[in-house]
Amino acid sequence: MSSEPPSAPRLAGRTPWWRSRTAIVTGVLLVAAALAVCFLRQGGGSGEVFLQAASADGQDPFTRSTARSTGRYASVMDDAGAAAAAGASRSLPGATPGLYAGTRNAAGCDVDQQIGYFTENQGRGRAFAGAAGIDPDAIPAYLHGLTPVHLRADTRVTDHGYKDGSVTSFQSVLQTGTAVLVDDRGTPRVRCACGNPLGPPVAVQGTPRARGGAWDSYDPAKVVVVTPAESVLDAIVVHDPANGGWFERPVGSSGDNDSRATPPKGGLPPGPSHPHTPGRSH
């Protein structure tokens, strides 16, 4: 069984994807309003949402952390323009340029180490595969097909943990700066700090009760939901907060094939010039 990653798509000479998809992104933002309302504002009953700081082990971790860094990232939702772009729905499609952050030519998650943990512990590997909806033998190919980036907004997900030999499932908010692996529709699929598989959030009845230590900048009104891009992506347009630049990371690559990108038209802005350090809670 090979753990070699699939060859990265070649992007030379191609028109940047965000220019041809601006209309698609705008349309999906409008359509997503009802979906996000269902996720985040459904009435009746009660429920819990676990807050997980970027550097924390998190709830019911599958593995030790494979996150190489959390860096310095501020929530793009602290910017009034970004909040307006997201609208009241707080929902953003995975194709949105600038939805994710990172450092050019550097991956925030060690995918091979993640694969090694599941190879060493077949029980956890089978549980992970079941939660991710794949065959256990497909774990290396699956993880190598994902793309390491960092969140640019506090993000709501369904988190799947591992406890006493069984898979757990709970609603979670991941802090801005969290290292994640995203799929070819731009949606988070693995949290690198704990190896937990991630899925789209589900409705919590009534007003969610937050559990866990909230970070200084946490604001429920600025939590976003990432919805799948309308079509498969060739690359993710990533913002580098360290230098204010932009780069393009081919889907399924870990930084070796990054290329410089011009600031995208549309999508999310660079954000605050003095980001906070992820992981700080109170």
Image (cartoon, rainbow, N blue to C red):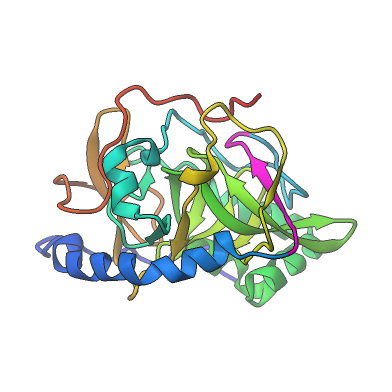
Relative image position of residue 22 (x, y in whole percent): 18, 64
Relative image position of residue 61 (x, y in whole percent): 74, 48
The residue located at (50%, 64%) in the rendering is 37
Q: How many marks?
A: 0
Relative image position of residue 116 (x, y in whole percent): 66, 53
Please name whichever residue, 116 or 199, is drawn nearer the observer in this view of the structure.
Answer: 199
Is residue 34 one of those drawn in magenta? no
Please name whichever residue, 144 or 260, is drawn nearer the observer in this view of the structure.
Answer: 260
70 relative to 31, above or below: above
Please name whichever residue, 93 or 108, is drawn nearer the observer in this view of the structure.
Answer: 93
The residue located at (46%, 44%) in the rendering is 222
Q: From which residue to which does the magenta span run?
A: 45-55
Whether residue 23 is visible:
yes
Relative image position of residue 126 (x, y in whole percent): 75, 69
The residue located at (78%, 64%) in the rendering is 122
Q: Quadrant of the C terminus?
A: top right
Please name whichever residue, 58 or 104, is drawn nearer the observer in this view of the structure.
Answer: 58
Q: Quadrant of the N terminus?
A: bottom right
Whether residue 102 is visible:
no
Horizontal side of residue 34 vs 156, given as left or right: left
Q: Find residue 159 and report its image quarter.
A: bottom right
Horizontal side of residue 221 vs 193, given as left or right: left
For the view shown, which residue lies furthest in the front direction?
A: 44
1 relative to 280, above or below: below
The residue located at (30%, 58%) in the rendering is 96
